[in-house]
Image (cartoon, rainbow, N blue to C red):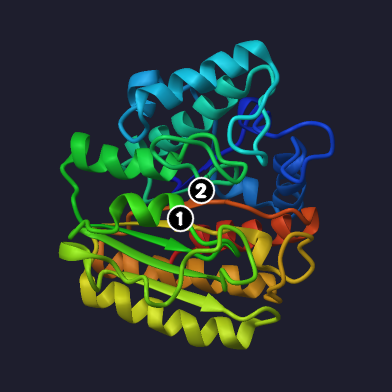
Amino acid sequence: MKSEVALYVDEALGSYGFPDGHPWGPDRQDAFWREAAGQRLDKSAEVCGSRAASAAEIGRFHDEAHVERVHQLSDRGYGLIDHGDTPAFSGVYEASAHVVGAALEGLHRIMAGEVLRTFQPIGGLHHAARERAAGFCVFNDCGVVIDTLRSQYGVQRVAYVDIDVHHGDGLYYPYESDPDFIYADIHEDGRYLYPGTGAATECGKGAGAGLKLNIPMQPASGDKEFMEAWERVEAHLREHKPEFILLQAGADSIAGDPLAHLQYTPRAHAHAAKRLCVIANELCGGRIMGFGGGGYNRKNLALGWCGVLNAFIRGSE
């Protein structure tokens, strides 16, 4: 029987991690994989490997100068890719290219009708802008997917849903005026947390006005507050009727993350994924991609991401 879910996990993806005790270390994929195997989720999804995206593919979203600068810093093996959070290491270009390549492979599988859903635990690098890296994010794999959907597959109306604790600024601002980009982001209030953006008043500009939904949460908000906010996300998606959905399921919004202050349990992530499967089935022919995003407490990311994967495996049942 054909698997409905492709799961992207391999050594190259696991190598996307920064050294010397950085919060985004190279052990994050392993933490997820141990939990997924323990829950036997690996037996219910099609486990797939990645490939390196080409510079031209990465360039569908990113400026050529940014791609070349990352390449040079990777070859040098040291330095800062952004202004302080994202250090270079030898091979960072190749690791980042594999994150993008895995996303493009997953997209191809969905558009070819081979699977309905994909999950990319090492992905969802939502702070990288077209011209720069930021916030542990070198290349914006979701941005590349969105621009590829449009340029290669003719899918224009795309929804991006983000429940990472940090605002997805690298997706919001490039498409702020886009009339076909539907955006919904539940995050900790930017007055208390990086990157300081995502106010409720940021709802799109020009032709994109009203298509963007930012829901800043107060520190210590838990599942009750999340569920209330989530109802607004569902209504937003149903109103604007996307053809394809992306979910960035950062686990740093779960209680106990060392870099943030929200207090969700993994049930929030499982609920979001389950409900998006229902909406994808209603509006998008079932097509949805999930990305792991942030998360710096290893137990939290393992449980949160497994909740998403399990919901994708079960679909809308």
Q: Is residue 277 above or below residue 34?
A: below
CA distance for labels 1 and 2: 6 Å
SS state under label 1? helix
Q: Is residue 55 left or right of residue 248?
A: left
Q: Is residue 233 above or below residue 22?
A: below
Are there few (<14), some (14-19), or many (20+) residues within 10 Å of tag 1?
A: many
Residue to which mark 2 is pinned? 127
Kindly give the residue lying farthest to the right in the view shown.
Answer: 21
Where residue 190 appears, as percent x and y from the top left, is 56, 68
Residue to which mark 1 is pinned? 169
Residue drawn at x 64%, y 74% is 267
Quadrant where the C terminus sits is: bottom left
Q: Amino acid at mark 2?
A: His
Q: Is residue 145 left or right of residue 251?
A: left
Residue drawn at x 50%, y 88% is 228
Label 1 close to label 2 by CB (< 8 Å)? yes
Q: Amino acid at mark 1?
A: Asp
